[in-house]
Image (cartoon, grey):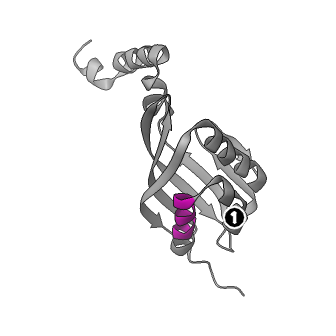
Amino acid sequence: MTAAPDIEAAARAYAAYFERVTPESLSELEQFCAPDIRFRDPFNDVTGVATLRQVFAKMFEDVEDPRFHVDDVAASASTAYLRWRMTFRKFNRDWEIPGMSELHFDGEGRVVLHIDHWDAAAQIYERLPLLGALLRFLRRRLSAERQARGG
């Protein structure tokens, strides 16, 4: 019988990896992820460590100097949560995206499911010139505060 993995330690090691990840270190994903890992975020829903590597390789192509800063780690028996900020440069401006990763682990302490939770509409789309104006209008129109004022 094998001992249960230390999920908090596995989550902290995974977090530390992402804080230092570079295009050159993407090959190290196998150390932390099960071969059939599923990754989901607002733009992707992929399965397999090779495909996950492609998602992150594309990130390095699409934005300048992407960095993850993990602010907190919480863990239970088989799941961990990372609260993070991603910083990068795109469209000649600096961006910061706060988010949360939900991580599920297998019996060997490898990530089998990684779900990133963050608000793409508010954190990216609303900052774009034409689309942003439309989305900000819709947000105001649908807000509970507006409804409470009778408007």
Residue 143 locus on image (x, y percent): 34, 23
From the viewer's perspective, is residue 95 above or below residue 66?
above
Q: Amino acid at mark 1?
A: Glu
Tell me the quadrant of the picture where the C terminus can be found: top left
In magenta stretch: residue 123: no
From the viewer's perspective, is residue 78 above or below residue 146?
below
Which stretch did the figure color magenta?
11-20
Q: Residue at x 71, y 50 (%)?
A: 52
Q: Residue at x 73, y 46 (%)?
A: 54
Please give left or right for residue 71 compared with residue 150 in the image. right
- Find disc 1 in the rendering and name its residue: 28
In magenta stretch: residue 13: yes
Furthest residue toward bottom:
1
- Dominant SS of magenta comes to helix
Foreground pick, 146 / 100? 100
Q: Residue at x 54, y 40 (%)?
A: 64
Q: Residue at x 48, y 58 (%)?
A: 82
From the viewer's perspective, is residue 147 above or below residue 80?
above
From the viewer's perspective, is residue 24 above or below residue 31?
above
Q: Secondary structure at mark 1?
A: helix
Please give left or right for residue 146 compared with residue 13 in the image. left
Tell me the quadrant of the picture where the N terminus can be found: bottom right
Foreground pick, 14 / 76? 14
Question: For the image shown, how many numbered marks are present on the structure?
Answer: 1
Residue 91 locus on image (x, y percent): 50, 28
Residue 23 locus on image (x, y percent): 66, 52
Quarter holding residue 59: top right
